[in-house]
Image: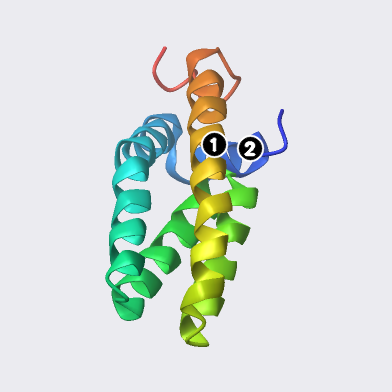
Amino acid sequence: MSEVLSPVALCALCDELGADAACSFAHHYLDLLDGRVQHLTEALAGDDAETAWVVALSLHSSSAMVGAQALADASRALATQLRAGALAAARLVLCDLAALATATARALLAFLARPVPGLVSASA
């Protein structure tokens, strides 16, 4: 579908949990996405590496679940930099991560707006 979103993971989540739960998770992910990026930004601005690390790990796992692999990879890279104490490098990763979050949100919203076999069947 796009370089930021692979629908395969979301379809797998649908197969595992059901269409309603998968769509609910994706919408919840979108609802929290901007706040997570903001929380990361604030934590790094305040040199709070521990808080930023926890948020980055959460963003990594939830992004992977919805098929946002590029954002998951950027979140993991950020967490790695934070664990190493490299705050300056982490701030550089955050710039890319914020742009990826915006692109991911657009792609996921577009994906959820169209009928997809497996994702619509449970709500139909």
Question: In the figure, residue 72 lies in which quadrant?
Answer: bottom right
Q: Which amino acid lies under the numbered mark 2 shown in the image of this protein?
A: Leu
Residue 49, position as x, y percentages in the image: 36, 78
Q: Residue at x 49, y 15 (%)?
A: 113
Instruction: Kindly check if marks 1 and 2 are in contact, taking CB atoms under 8 A apart as contact.
Output: yes
Q: Secondary structure at mark 1?
A: helix
Q: Which residue is mark 2?
A: 5
Q: Horizontal placement of 120 versus 32: left or right?
A: right
Question: In the figure, residue 44 lies in which quadrant?
Answer: bottom left
The mark found on residue 104 in the picture is: 1
In the foreground, 37 or 86: 86
Q: Horizontal placement of 14 versus 43: left or right?
A: right
Q: CA distance from mark 1 to mark 2?
A: 6 Å
Q: Which amino acid lies under the numbered mark 1 shown in the image of this protein?
A: Thr
Chain-order first, disc 1 or disc 2:
2
Q: Residue at x 45, y 54 (%)?
A: 62
